[in-house]
Image (tube, rainbow, N blue to C red):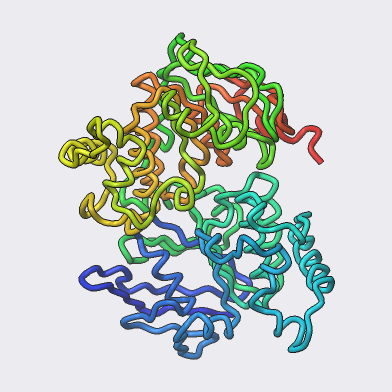
Amino acid sequence: MHLQLADVRKSFGDNSVLRGVSFDVGPGEVVALVGENGAGKSTLTRVISGAHQPDSGRLLIDGTPTVLKDPQAAMAQGIEVIYQEFQQNLFPHLSVAENMYVLDRERVFGRLFVSKQRMAAEAGRALRRLGMEIDVHRQVSELSVAERQMLEIAKAMTHELRLIILDEPTAALDEQESEQLFAQVNRLREAGVSVIYISHRLDEVFALSDRVVVLRDGRVTLDAPTGQLTPAQVVTAMVGDAVDDFYPKERNARDEVVLEVRGGNGARFHDIDLQVRAGEVVGIGGVVGCGRSDLLRALFGLQPLAGSVLVGGSAVRVASVEDAIGSRIAYLSPDRQAEGLCMSQSVEANVSLASLRAFSSAGGVVRRAKERAATGAVISDLRVRAASPSIAVSSLSGGNQQKALFAKWVMTRPRVLLMDEPTRGVDVGAKTEIYRIINQLTADGVAVLLVSSDLPELVAMSDRVVVMREGRLVAELTGDGLDEQSILKHALVGAA
């Protein structure tokens, strides 16, 4: 497909989101679409997918002006979109196979009876083409975030594709799973399928794309072949100013041990002995499924944990989330919409949710004036950009939602902060602000455990990294020995 956008404009009330966007994607071309959250990428995606109608401008397919009146019209043209919040398109209580074909049974299997055995066989073949070995009879609710992401991509690839838009497709994938996805993107390119690849990870952009298009404030600020660009040029086009130090790590570690785990055991991790000092960031490296996320969830009372946990030298019980919060342990979930925030509630209500006791009387009545003053201060300090604290948190950009999630836990005055993929799906500008927040917390003596699939981030923002493989700690890396290659070597040795 040759897709052309010519002077596309779109406004919502007085908010002008797309201000004359023009670029094209050729057959078998991978175009990286990058820009800060709020730059217009999501709205542009919805225009291409038929979910929004442009106010003006034209969309041409193979040279013919085309009106895509709804998503079904776009799919009829061979256009598929994998949105960043992909889980909204999955049915958690159906099997993997049923999810893949629940809306396409007639197209794939005909009008009459559907053989579940045949459906499972077709689903298995489609997943194996992606390099995935998932039991197609499993319920989707049992899959990890990474497995669900790959399932959604596999669903799209079962259709007659001419153009696919991938919105942050590797945000929940580890290194191996990302490589499998990259192989699929290259296969699509070779088959003549057009690809729009939206990502905040510039290493992916430069490794995969033929051309880079940058949006800023609803306008194209850069459109050039990838081979003619540097990452610094792309970042400057995104934010308007050169970013000299992308990872502004501060060294705030002290001698005091704040968090200690002795003989920690859970369903997916074993014999964990670990210490984190005040002001220290300890990264946990490893592939998805190695037990790193399970360890964090167990330390926050979300999964069973055997062994001893000490905070500030005193043994604590973390059999529940309430126990963990009472022990001044906070947890930043990798899925802010499903687990971290109440999307229909206000920014203010979300920020104060975990610390309401601090604003309540003995009878349990919340003192609203005290609550508003405290939440307003932390919202301002963490630079959560919202028109008002009373607006729904769902109306914020992804980066500001993530900062609101940080604000929620900052309000609890934690001694330990467990962070799982803290910059997942946020733009370059928001990432640097999140790193500033982490520095601020460690300067105050908070002990941080960091899980991140972004290896440059993990290396740059950690004081040291421990590597997990198959549920066990297998290495500790510091100083000159801490680099991406060493993390991968220890994480993958012995892996299937």
Seen in the image, is 303 located left or right of residue 127? left
Q: Residue 72: x, y in percent?
A: 53, 83
In the picture, measured across the screen, residue 494 lies left or right of residue 454, that is right
Q: Is residue 178 visible?
A: no
Q: Residue visible at 45% across and 27% down?
A: 329
Residue ranking furthest to the front: 363
* Outermost residue to the left: 369
Q: Which quadrant would residue 330 be assigned to in this image?
A: top left
> Which quadrant of the rendered structure holds the C terminus?
top right
Depth order, front residue of 218/435:
435
Number of dots carrying numbers:
0
Instruction: Identify which residue is drawn at 40% across, 18% down.
Output: 252
Q: Residue at x 55, y 41 (%)?
A: 454
Q: Residue 84 at x, y = what percent?
A: 51, 59
Please state which of residues 198 and 339 is positioned toward the viewer in this rendering.
339
Please report the residue visible at 70 percent of the width from the left and 61 percent of the height from the top.
184
- Is residue 258 visible in the rendered image? The answer is yes
Percent coordinates x, y for residue 465 in the rendering? 58, 25
Establish if 165 lies above or below 261. below
Q: Nearer the viewer, residue 384 or 313?
A: 313
Rendered-image quadrant of the N terminus: bottom right
- Determine which quarter of the picture holds residue 412: top left
Horizontal side of 313 relative to 109 (left or right) equals left
Find residue 468 and report its horizontal and vertical position in percent.
Answer: 68, 30
482 or 275: nearer the viewer: 275
